[in-house]
Image: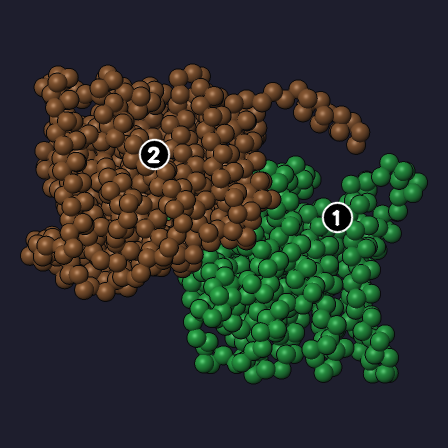
Amino acid sequence: MNWLTADLLPSPEFAQRLLLVAVLLPLFAALLVQLPARLGAHSLARLLGPLALGSQSVLLLLLWLLLPLLPWPLALALTPTAATVAPIDRLALLLAMVASAAVLVFWSRGLDHPEPSRRDAWMLLLATGLVGLSLAGDVITLYCLVELTTLAGLALITLRGHTRSLIAMLRALIPSALGSLLIVTAIAILVHETQTLLGFSQLAAVDDSLWSEPLARTAIALLLFGLALKVGMFPATAWVGELCAVASGRIGFLVYALFAQLVLVMIARLMVIFSASGIAQPMLVLALLTLLASALAASRARDFPRLLAYSGGIQLGLILLAFALGDTAGSFIGVALLMHHLLIELALFALANRWNGSLRRLNGLATRLPWVTAALVVLVLSLIAIPPLPGFWLRLALIVTLTDSGLMITPLLIVGVLIALMIESIVWLSLLRRLFVPAQLATLPDPLDPCVYPELQHPKAIDAALTVFAGLAVLGLMLTFSPPTPWIEHLLVERALW
Amino acid sequence: METHLNTLLQTLSAWQLTGLDRLWLAAAMTALLALLLGRWRWFAALGALLYALQFGLLISTQALSGEPVFASFQLQLFHQQLTWRFHAVSWFFGLIVIGAAFVSSWFSAADAELSGGRGQRFHLALALHVVALMVLLASSDALTLLLGWELVGWTGLLLVLTDCGSRLVDALKERMLGVIGSMFLLAAIGLLYAATGSFAFNAIEQLWTVPSTVALWSLLGLLSLGFALATGLVPFHWPRLKLTGYTQSSATLVVSVVTTRMSLFAVLLIVLSAFGDEQLEHMFLPLTWISAHDLGGWFAALTIVVATIGALKQRDIRFLLAWLMLAQSGYLWLGLVFGGAQGSAGSLLLVFADALAQFALWLLLLALVNRSGDHPTPAFNAPDTNRALQMMIAIIAVFSLAGLPPTLGFVAKWLLYGALIESRQWILLALIALANLGLLFVLLRFLHRLFLIEPSAPKSSDPGWQTAIQLAPILGLATLTIVAGIAPGPALSWVAHVQQTLALPIVRWHPEGIMHFWWILDTPWIAATIKGLGGVALLVVWWWLYRATRASVLPAKVRTYAYITPNMPHHEDPDESLAPNWIITPIAWPAGLLEFLGRRLSPALTVLGCVLALLLWAWML
């Protein structure tokens, strides 16, 4: 980037507008996508979505490259002035890029719905929500984008048109609405107490003594627990599996796995701002409960999407645990775990598109899908922390940091982590066993399971490619013999709040 | 790019291979050749040659008596320099590992089924497992030990899966326990690092400065549970036992006989060298008078008793041998727990003796199975010219396992008894002696089943060269057992070097290998008399057995003695056991209970046990 001199740099207003355009592009496309469809230009309607998402990804990449060179901060907020909200950092931009690219890769081309443009519109709204969520710089914007993402996600699930999906959506609505209630209450209290519009920079500038006031502490707890509830952490663990079971694998990844991790990063940022309130300890307990509840649920899972959802819950618990430890090491491990988990979930949810029934259907698939199975084995072994795969180093670092933290509940946390990991290992190894058991030796098929032709178990080419790519990426990380430490450290050091 | 290339070339040209580098490269080369040429019918012979080369390279490292040999490869993690090195302990166990791979490869040369893809998988898995074991044996701290341990576990799974007799379900169950065990080891390493800031074995010594023993007990508990789970000790034995029982390939024996003993290597490195024998004696469970020493001793005794009862109740001779191996694990732990010069020497020597005898017995069994063409249950008779030789081999191995003179097993077991006498553990001594009698009874039944029961299927007409190829390594193992038993000097000198490296008390020995706990045995002529009497007993048993098989009609007493009827079907359910007779009944119920818990409730019990142990640990903290 040496060729980019100061004369060639965009003005602050232009860069800010570029950011707004990047975030809002899918929103405009969502509003427009139905028009060509109604006018009969179906090809244009089909192209509009991928075009908007592709442009968004390119713009975000451009901003990612420009960000270190810009002498002024960029910020995204619904509140009036950019000065009050936190400046955007490279981690936020990276996550926004991932979100945009994930929606593009998982674009369904509307083939599985009679009215594809309606589905495309909701997908684009989901993209707006996910990208905006990664870049939000104040609590109110964050809340609005969380609601937008939830709404788009639930709509996409309902669009499948099954009674099951409608029931699952209604069930999911209950904890989600409860979470919203907690967040709104917290926002009201915090606005009243701080007399600000809850920009992250404004909150960071508030005197720490305020955070030790009972009312403020209650508001903080309500805010963070509300956010956690909305992404299916304890006690809302059960509905996550239900939701993923009725959604397709792609939607499941976007609506649950990706969304939850983006919200977790925001929770981590808020925990840093509110560190004086002592919120870290309750969050550690929440992480532990999520870990254990998800592990127990995973042990009872009888289909692949549910298994993925609950295993994802265990990973979310681990990430939250790392973030709640608070120090630099915790943040580092949290971000590294998050990246690792995102990569693996991307591949596994892609497989869940076709592997969406009972686990019994997967018996003996290894002989028919050798490459996909090989990649899956690598991913699963990394997920259950088998050395020398990257997952092992991250778990080891987490356990060392936990043991080193010297908190009163440390032993309990270690016990919880080990139990959850043990159960997760058993569950995933059992799945691998199924894949390798010859079909003729496998147990009889489930009589309640609809008859499925074997070829329907074969993932689509793009899903298989994603899985193999993720497996190779994990192996590549292993061969470097260390996690990409400097890169992640760079992401963290750059951030003003960490 | 050019600069990087130049730097790389300079590094490579300046690279001086150490002894360990050469050994690792040879092991990796064997794996590569197995991948490329493994489909070739005669690769087994080439494989044996390559293992012989590794053996030579191991000897040339001179790690037994000289300085440790370091690998050039190093790793920087958590601000720690991770290195790998070979010293006397690694050398001793490396000798057993490479020897086992050599014998296994040689033996497989006669297996006509091991060609094409199956042969390639067999040889590749064996070579990879040996590479993994070499990495494990070169561990220089807790983290490299864990890395090696996991590598060995997963390559062991690959090896087991090449055996058509082993079952995928059992193999994965066993690995599952291994993974759970690794979680405990991971927690132990985390605890160690957090408390001392280092992964080094001797960092544990720093924990002695902590006024509370909680950290130490936590560490010891996590390590013990981890190793017990990973190596399938009581009560986590069932998957390992089934895996061993269904063995049909010589490669699986490397996992069953050698790899499972690697826990001893790990325990030697961590527990004994870091915790120290004296400290274990003075570590009391909070609010009790039970020391870590006593706890370990009774745990080992429980393993021996349960395994002996299991073997007594077993009707399938492969499962009988599998139970026997579990019992021998108990003896190994017993020697380590009671430490001292004699205890640790007894354990180390028993690893060696056990590997020789178990390998000989299993290979003999596999040879008879193949030659009778009776898959999957073994044939029990071999009425041909080699019968006398086969019987002699079997009797030598049985004598060694039962701890009878003049075999190497006798020297090892006597050292163990010596350790118990020195520690004044009279109850344990009586218990172990009784269990050993039970083992002897089991082994006699094994001989009876192997040679005196009529075959269930007609024998195939295998060519003579196959018999010669298979019998040669077995004969070598038996010869080594008896020669090392008569003159255990070299073996004892290796053991003394290992003890010196670990800073353990060193056993006093001389070429005749007489023990020191009982002064009268110091006299050479008494030792020679004992060995001579043992030799006579060995010949008498052999002659009696040989004569019995030559008789056209076996005396009824022979059959009733071991309560096995000649008409018993051979295709048995290995899980099924005989109705216990009046001798076994009073002591069988605790074993039955443990067996039931281990078999029926294995996964649930494992998780529950782990949860309870962890909760207890958390409560103690």
Which residue occupies 9% across, 33% down? B426
State the residue position of label 2: B476
| Percent position of residue A4, x then y | 89, 40
Identify the element where label 1 is drawn: helix
| Percent position of residue A401, x then y | 48, 39
Q: The residue marked by circle 1 belongs to what chain?
A: A
Q: Residues within 10 Å of mark 2 (few under 14, many from 20)?
A: some
Which residue occupies 70% across, 80% down? A113
Going by the image, does B237 lie left or right of A257? Answer: left
Identify the element where label 2 is drawn: helix
Write down the quadrant of residue B203 in the picture: top left
**Looking at this view, is B348 or A72 the one in front?**
B348
Q: CA distance from mark 2 to mark 1?
A: 84 Å
Going by the image, does B112 lie left or right of B77? Answer: left
Q: Are marks 2 and 1 in contact (CB under 8 Å)?
A: no
Which residue occupies 72% across, 77% down? A111
Q: Which chain is brown?
A: B
User: What amino acid is found at the position of numbered circle 2 in the picture?
Assistant: Gly
**Looking at this view, is A271 or B324 the one in front?**
B324
| Residue A83: image tag | 1
| Residue A201: image tag | none
- Chain A: drawing colour: green
Looking at the figure, which quarter contains the C terminus of chain B? top left
Which residue occupies 60% across, 44% down? B36
Q: Is residue B95 above or below residue B171?
A: above
